[in-house]
Image: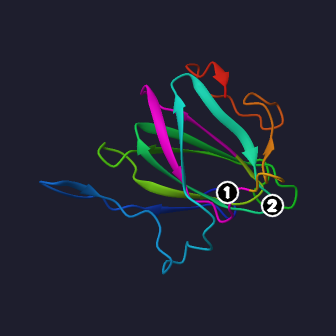
Amino acid sequence: MEIKINGAEIKELAVHTDDRGLLMEFLRNDEPIFQDFGQVYLTLVKAGVAKGWHYHKMQDDHFVCVGGTALVVLSDQRPYSPTKGVTQEFILSAPELEGNHWLVKIPKGVFHGFAAYNCPEAKIINIPTKAYNYQEPDEYRVSWNSPEVGYKWPEQIVRGG
């Protein structure tokens, strides 16, 4: 897949299966895509809901789908970016499903959101480069249907979350 947003990257993830189950590595500290480790967390979105929009000023995110199928959307609204105004969609699938098994790197300053895609719920593991600061969160939000972002979610998405 061609990456259209400056600083965004994808990493193809290998799913190794055998009669016991499966294994899929996400991110290793000896890979070029690795920058720093902040924390790891799981986020879930139910069908019909868009989790978005937000961006970070100090951290990059690394999304991997581990349950269902997720529509992950990046929108570059950074005033200094050569790809300002570009929006790109990624469809990520859990390792036990057919589809794209990718890690998506979301650079700081890029609006992002996600939704379950043709499934009851989607689960995303995020590996941000900074730990969440509860006193001063590095999270800047606008509404899921904000004209500032200008993205039209698929019609089955009826609300933000």
Residue 9 in which image quadrant: bottom right
Camera-nearest residue between 150 and 120: 120
Magenta segment boundaries in residue numbering:
112-132
Is residue 4 shown above or below 45?
below
Looking at the image, tell me whether mark 2 or mark 1 is earlier in sequence order.
1
Amino acid tagged 1: Ile
Which residue matches tag 2? 81
Amino acid tagged 2: Ser
- Residue 2 visible in the snapshot: no
Residue shown at 78%/31% (left/top)? 143
How many residues crowd mark 2 within 10 Å: few (<14), some (14–19), many (20+)?
Answer: some
Quarter of the image containing the C terminus? Answer: top right
Query: Does residue 126 belong to the magenta stretch?
Result: yes
* Residue 5 - label: 1
Disc 2, disc 1: CB below 8 Å?
A: yes
Residue shown at 55%/57% (left/top)? 40
Is residue 135 shown above or below 46?
below
Looking at the rendered structure, the number of numbered marks drawn on it comes to 2
Q: Secondary structure at mark 1?
A: loop
